[in-house]
Image (tube, rainbow, N blue to C red):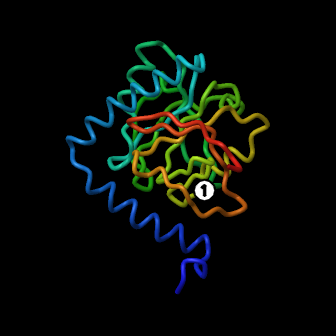
Amino acid sequence: MAVTDISPEQRKAQLRTRLRAARKARSSTQRARDEQAIAAQIVTLAKQQSVGSLAAFLSAPTEPPTAALLHWAADCQMPVLLPRTRPDGALDWVWAAEVEDTITHLGIPEAQGPLAEAQAIEHVDLIIIPALAVSPRGARLGQGGGFYDRTLAALSHVPPTAALVFDEEVLDDLPLEPHDRSIDLIVTPKRIITCTPGE
């Protein structure tokens, strides 16, 4: 079967299988190095764009690590929202400073604490979101649950979005479906990319 005969959904499934396997193969040494590098890139981005508040996420073991950047934000007393999944497939948000514990929900670390106001996510300066792959044109391949696509689509105002990926996960061509939401920025351990839709 030619690549052109495969539906976007099938291509996504194939990509997810390959990318997840590559992530599992990363060593603990690589992960530790990536964590510090990603935090440094986020600090650079925050200074460039005068970010005073953000939404981030608690990274799963194979994802680009977010612990160091969350520690940095806490040290700066920067307000940070963390996601919590809802039964309807969207996300609620919890202020990181109020998080009491974390649990694994469907294999994903998740913040537990008092919910922030529903509109709080619309007022942060930057939303940092997970991804398996991204393209320089702003296409994003997630894990397949659609939580961020649904959440962003429901907002009246969408702050700038930045996806965290490893450098080799920036791909020129990604399959898209009508419900997919594009991103504005890409952050990897080595670079920050401003997405250019349509190019």
Side of 62 where 74 appears, left or right: right
Q: Which corner quadrant of the image does residue 2 belong to?
A: bottom right
Residue 80 appears at what percent x and percent y?
53, 25
Residue 191 appears at what percent x and percent y?
44, 34
Does residue 125 lie above or below 155 as drawn? above
Between 47 and 81, the one nearer to me in the picture: 47
Residue extending furthest right?
Answer: 156
Query: Label 1 sits on what residue type?
Result: Gly
Residue at image location 46% in from the left, 71% down from the top: 14
Between 168 and 11, the one nearer to me in the picture: 168
For the residue labelled by badge 1, is the local secondary structure a helix, a strand or a loop?
Answer: loop
Side of 167 where 119 appears, left or right: right
Q: Which corner quadrant of the image does residue 59 belong to?
A: top left
Residue 28 appears at what percent x and percent y?
21, 44
Residue 41 appears at what percent x and percent y?
43, 28
Q: Which residue is mark 1?
A: 146
Residue extending furthest bottom?
Answer: 1
Does residue 43 lie above or below 162 as drawn? above
Q: Which corner quadrant of the image does residue 189 belong to?
A: top left
Does residue 45 lie above or below 6 as drawn? above
Residue at image location 55% in from the left, 74% down from the top: 10
Residue at image location 70% in from the left, 31% down from the top: 122
Residue at image location 68% in from the left, 32% down from the top: 159
